[in-house]
């Protein structure tokens, strides 16, 4: 059994200067692909579960059951955290009750005082159970209805106050966005990252929107205190691309090529390739 809180793995990453990947999971294929790859590369990992993905997979308890059983089935020995991604206040408590080992409470859309108060409550409840907590200041942008937001920049004083609640990891908007980046994206704001790092007193930092950030920016961010990098979109795109290639090549029409175990295999393999690439880039291979 290797399911653990994200706290220790992030402190180790922080001390040794590498990043731990949060790979968001969407279904059975995702969980299998990620668990087998991290075991192969002896890397710790954080499985990110959004509230929407949890609903799709049949609820928080079913997510935990699937991860727990697959973890045992594949004899996973590396540390794995099951982490609620962008949790609401209510969702944070539900995921905690279901046995998640790590929770992100995203109060960034609340007025600051309310974000602070709710973060404190979530920290108290989670820490009582040995569960790690991520908080966020400065909403992370992304594409919504075709409109691309540039990514909000976090206020350092707000970062300081939220980090002081005792959270185990901290996400700040530094110009990053979810989804792929537009060609005219200005890049990560390293001055803000430096300031956030300074005011948050060595709390491991989280970089959301990890898909499509150039390698040199990832490496620089890690060298400046980012210990967790979230990746979702890239796995989805590569899964879809491989599935499309299989169907466009007419393979589903040959023999039993329509069997979902065959149909979804190229996509599952594509996810493994993305995960291998990210673990290598973030530097977590052989760090379990
Ligand atoms: P991407 O989908 O851009 O990789 O972002 C993932 C993420 O930050 C999840 O919280």
Image (spheres, helix red, strand yellow):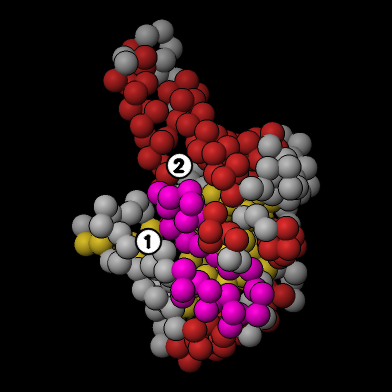
Q: Which mark is residue 201?
A: none
State which tag comes first along the sequence, 2 or 1.
1
Does the Cβ of the disc 1 residue fall within 8 Å of ligand 1? no
Residue numbers of the magenta segment: 190-218
Residue 4 x, y percent position in the rendering: 73, 57
Measuring 65% from the left and 35% from the top, which residue is drawn there? 36
Residue 194 x, y percent position in the rendering: 53, 74
Q: Extreme left residue here? A: 146
| Kind of element beneath mark 1 | loop
Residue 211 x, y percent position in the rendering: 43, 50
Residue 34 x, y percent position in the rendering: 59, 40
**Side of 15 relative to 180 (left or right):** right
- Depicted 287 relative to depicted 159: above or below: above
- The quarter holding residue 242 reads top left
Q: Nearer the viewer, residue 51 or 7?
A: 7
**Residue 287 in sight in this render:** yes
- Depicted 19 relative to depicted 170: above or below: above
Does the Cβ of the disc 2 residue fall within 8 Å of ligand 1? yes
> Crowding near pointer 2: few (<14 within 10 Å), some, many (20+)?
many
Residue wearing tag 2: 235
| Kind of element beneath mark 2 | helix
Measuring 63% from the left and 36% from the top, which residue is drawn there? 37
Asked whether 261 falls inside the magenta stretch, the response is no
Asked whether 197 falls inside the magenta stretch, the response is yes
> Crowding near pointer 1: few (<14 within 10 Å), some, many (20+)?
some
Measuring 64% from the left and 48% from the top, which residue is drawn there? 283
Q: Nearer the viewer, residue 183 or 61?
A: 183
Q: Are marks 2 and 1 in contact (CB under 8 Å)?
A: no
Q: Which mark is residue 187?
A: 1
Q: Extreme top residue here? A: 255
Disc 2 to disc 1, C-alpha distance: 21 Å
**Side of 152 relative to 134 (left or right):** left
């Amino acid at each position: 059994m290797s399911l653990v809180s994200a706290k220790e793995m992030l402190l180790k990453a922080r001390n040794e200067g590498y990043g731990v990947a949060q790979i968001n999971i969407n279904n059975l294929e995702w969980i299998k692909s990620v668990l087998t790859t991290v075991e192969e590369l002896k890397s710790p990992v954080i499985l990110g579960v959004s509230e929407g993905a949890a609903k799709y997979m049949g609820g928080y308890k079913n997510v935990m059951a699937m991860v727990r059983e697959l973890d045992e089935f594949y004899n996973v020995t590396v540390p794995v955290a099951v982490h609620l991604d962008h949790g609401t206040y209510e969702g944070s408590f539900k995921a905690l009750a279901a046995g998640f080992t790590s929770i992100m409470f995203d109060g960034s859309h609340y007025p600051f005082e309310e974000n602070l108060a709710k973060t404190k409550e979530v920290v108290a409840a989670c820490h009582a159970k040995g569960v790690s907590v991520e908080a966020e200041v400065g909403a992370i942008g992304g594409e919504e209805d075709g409109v691309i937001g540039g990514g909000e920049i976090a206020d350092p004083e707000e970062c300081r106050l939220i980090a002081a609640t005792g959270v185990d990891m901290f996400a700040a908007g530094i110009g990053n966005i979810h989804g792929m980046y537009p060609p005219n994206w200005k890049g990560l704001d390293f001055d803000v990252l430096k300031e956030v790092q300074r005011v948050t007193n060595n709390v491991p930092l989280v970089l959301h929107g990890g898909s499509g950030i150039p390698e040199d920016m990832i490496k620089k961010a890690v060298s400046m205190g980012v210990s967790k990098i979230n990746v979702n979109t890239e796995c989805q795109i590569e899964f879809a691309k491989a599935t499309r290639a299989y169907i466009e090549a007419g393979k589903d029409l040959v023999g039993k090529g329509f069997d979902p175990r065959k149909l979804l295999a190229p996509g599952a393999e594509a996810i493994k390739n993305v995960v291998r690439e990210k673990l290598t880039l973030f530097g977590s291979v052989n760090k379990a």
